[in-house]
Image (tube, helix red, strand yellow):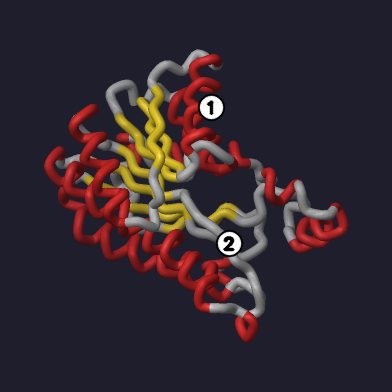
């Protein structure tokens, strides 16, 4: 991966940060994207302290199409290409559907599904020009099975499957693969900050009896970005400890 440039949305925290760090360990040049300029700067500094010099970060709201166009254009001018795209950015606005307002619906759809379109649309042009690309879209177990209080989130994450398979069919002969990874409950900062009683209730539903780790997600995602994964496209990979089996 030493000559590969990877773009990771939501790449400075949680699962996204673990994916970014795994890509850096594999030798890729990693460009993280998030909405928070301060966190982006701190993330670049922290990675350089860890010995990773091949890093950059852009402030971008993936829910804003024009913002994504501008960022990718700048990346093209500065680095010339994007070989790997990880669509990881996402938000939640949970509530029971009969209490869900339009603002909460739109916020999740525009970021979690619209954001995948917004950033992939300019990036796919670069990949088609180079006749190479690896795209991994982060979905969710709740996009597969649904979840009470998450009609917006589940709908957006389910939509990612259709997007993934359609784009995979369009680009397969151009040496571009498009796959989906669907995590279950992962020990992110958000989950670990839940009350212990709620966390125990979640774990009790998982057949393997524990939460997943961000490193486990990153290992799977990065495998799908390698050159020797070129025969895998249009696939979804469940990594949920057996919480949902199909």
**Which residue corresponds to the image point at 48% horizontal and 33% vertical from the top-left?**
40
- On screen, residue 23 above or below 165: above
| Image coords of residue 125 (percent x, y) | 17, 48
Q: Is residue 59 left or right of residue 129?
A: right
The image quarter in which residue 153 lies: bottom right
Q: In the image, which is nearer the foreground, mark 2 or mark 1? A: 1
**Which residue corresponds to the image point at 40% horizontal and 40% vertical from the top-left?**
59
**Which residue corresponds to the image point at 42% horizontal and 16% vertical from the top-left?**
53
Q: Residues within 10 Å of mark 2 (few under 14, many from 20)?
A: some
Q: Is residue 105 left or right of residue 73?
A: right
Q: Is residue 176 left or right of residue 234?
A: left
Q: Which mark is residue 92?
A: 2
Closer to us: 179 or 78: 78
Residue at numbered disc 1: 42
- On screen, residue 158 above or below 23: below
Q: Is residue 205 left or right of residue 125?
A: right
Placement of the C terminus among the 4 image quadrants: bottom right
Closer to us: 130 or 8: 8
| Image coords of residue 12 (percent x, y) | 52, 36
| Image coords of residue 167 (percent x, y) | 26, 60
| Direction left: furthest residue | 129
| Direction right: furthest residue | 197
Placement of the N terminus among the 4 image quadrants: top left
| Image coords of residue 88 (percent x, y) | 46, 49
Is mark 2 in CB contact (under 8 Å) with mark 1? no
Closer to us: 200 or 193: 193
| Cα distance in 3D space between marks 2 and 1 | 24 Å
**Which residue corresponds to the image point at 35% horizontal and 56% vertical from the top-left?**
64
| Badge 2 or badge 1: first in the primary sequence | 1
């Amino acid at each position: 991966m030493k000559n590969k440039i990877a773009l990771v949305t939501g790449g400075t925290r949680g699962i996204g940060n673990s994916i970014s760090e795994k890509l850096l360990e594999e030798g890729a040049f990693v460009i993280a994207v998030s909405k928070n300029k301060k966190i982006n700067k701190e993330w670049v500094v922290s990675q350089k302290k860890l010995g990773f010099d091949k890093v950059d970060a852009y402030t971008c709201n993936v829910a804003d199409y024009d913002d994504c166009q501008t960022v990718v254009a700048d990346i093209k001018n500065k680095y010339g290409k994007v070989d790997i795209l990880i669509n990881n950015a996402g938000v939640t606005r949970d509530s029971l559907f009969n209490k869900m307002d339009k603002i909460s619906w739109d916020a999740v759809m525009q970021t979690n599904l619209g954001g995948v379109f917004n950033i992939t649309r300019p990036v796919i042009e670069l990949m088609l020009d180079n006749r190479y690309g690896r795209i991994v879209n982060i979905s969710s177990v709740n996009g597969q099975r649904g979840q009470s209080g998450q009609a917006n989130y589940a709908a957006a994450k389910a939509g990612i499957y259709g997007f993934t398979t359609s784009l995979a069919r369009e680009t397969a002969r151009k040496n571009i693969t498009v796959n989906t990874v669907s995590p279950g409950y992962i020990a992110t900062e958000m989950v670990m900050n839940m009350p212990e009683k709620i966390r125990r209730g979640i774990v009790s539903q998982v057949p393997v009896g524990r939460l997943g780790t961000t490193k486990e997600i990153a290992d799977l995602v990065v495998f799908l970005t390698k050159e020797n994964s070129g025969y895998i496209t249009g696939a979804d990979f469940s990594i949920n400890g057996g919480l949902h089996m199909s």
